[in-house]
């Protein structure tokens, strides 16, 4: 099911009659995936301490397969005709109770677009997860980014576990 194929969220006006159009929707095509991958490149440049590297072609191909298999979803935020944000999630049944769980796998927002626009992506992701039958949503943030943790807490999420990583 398609969440909404780029529905207009709102229009903002800053310079007289010039209006910025904000839209949000579910990614459906490989070309849309490539637009979101540009944000992944920016994110990985900002966070050089991350394990591994970001390979845009591999990323786009993998997500294309996940979306076609209906176990992955990406919601994108567009400003006029440019993709400026994206959140991706994976769906799986919890082996402990069998309930469908959505796990956020990435959340890329262009640095100049962060703020309340981030909340719009989370809200759209939550809507999509509910429409697909998920009973729980798991979100993550990088170590040292407690501002995001406080944001998650304000919108109803609670900390569950701490993950550790190691290259092998």
Image (cartoon, rainbow, N blue to C red):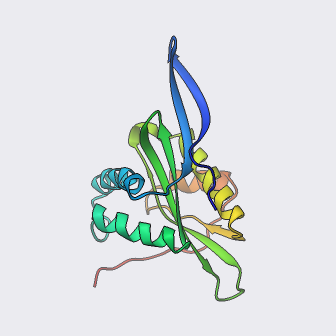
Q: How many marks?
A: 0
For the C terminus, the quadrant is bottom left
Instruction: Compare residues 2 and 136 and report the one nearer the observer.
Output: 2
Q: In the rendering, at what x and y percent does residue 97 appear? A: 72, 86
Would residue 54 be seen by someone viewing this image from the given angle? no
The quadrant in which the N terminus is found is: bottom right
* Position above or below: 71 against 5: below
Q: Is residue 9 above or below residue 134?
A: above
Residue 116 is at least partly visible in this image: yes
> Does residue 39 appear to the left or right of 122 in the view shown?
left
Residue 131 quadrant: bottom right
Q: Please determine whether, in this image, residue 61 is positioned above or below residue 14.
A: below
- Residue 88 at x, y = what percent? 50, 61
Residue at position x 40%, y 56% in the image: 33
Q: Is residue 69 above or below residue 56?
A: below
Identity of the residue furthest to the bottom in this view: 96
Q: Nearer the viewer, residue 132 or 162?
A: 132
Residue at 64%, 88% in the rendered image: 95
Q: Position of residue 60 (x, y in %)?
A: 36, 63
* Residue drawn where x is 65% and y is 63% of the image: 129
Horizontal and vertical percent for residue 39? 36, 50
For the view shown, which residue lies furthest in the top direction? Answer: 16
């Amino acid at each position: 099911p398609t969440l909404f194929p780029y529905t207009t969220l709102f229009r903002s006006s800053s310079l007289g009659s010039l209006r910025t159009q904000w839209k949000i929707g579910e990614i459906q095509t490989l070309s849309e995936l490539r637009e979101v991958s540009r944000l992944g490149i920016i994110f990985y440049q900002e966070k050089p301490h991350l394990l591994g590297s970001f390979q845009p072609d591999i990323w786009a191909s993998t997500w294309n397969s996940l979306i076609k298999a209906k176990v992955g979803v990406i919601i994108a935020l567009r400003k006029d005709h440019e993709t400026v944000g994206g959140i991706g999630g994976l769906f799986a049944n919890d082996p402990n109770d069998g309930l469908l769980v959505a796990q956020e796998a990435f959340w890329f927002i262009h640095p100049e677009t962060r703020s309340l626009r981030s909340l719009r992506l989370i809200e759209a992701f939550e809507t999509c997860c509910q429409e697909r039958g998920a009973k729980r949503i798991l979100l993550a943030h990088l170590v040292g980014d407690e501002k995001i943790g406080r944001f998650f807490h304000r919108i109803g999420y609670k900390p569950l576990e701490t993950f550790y990583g190691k290259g092998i």
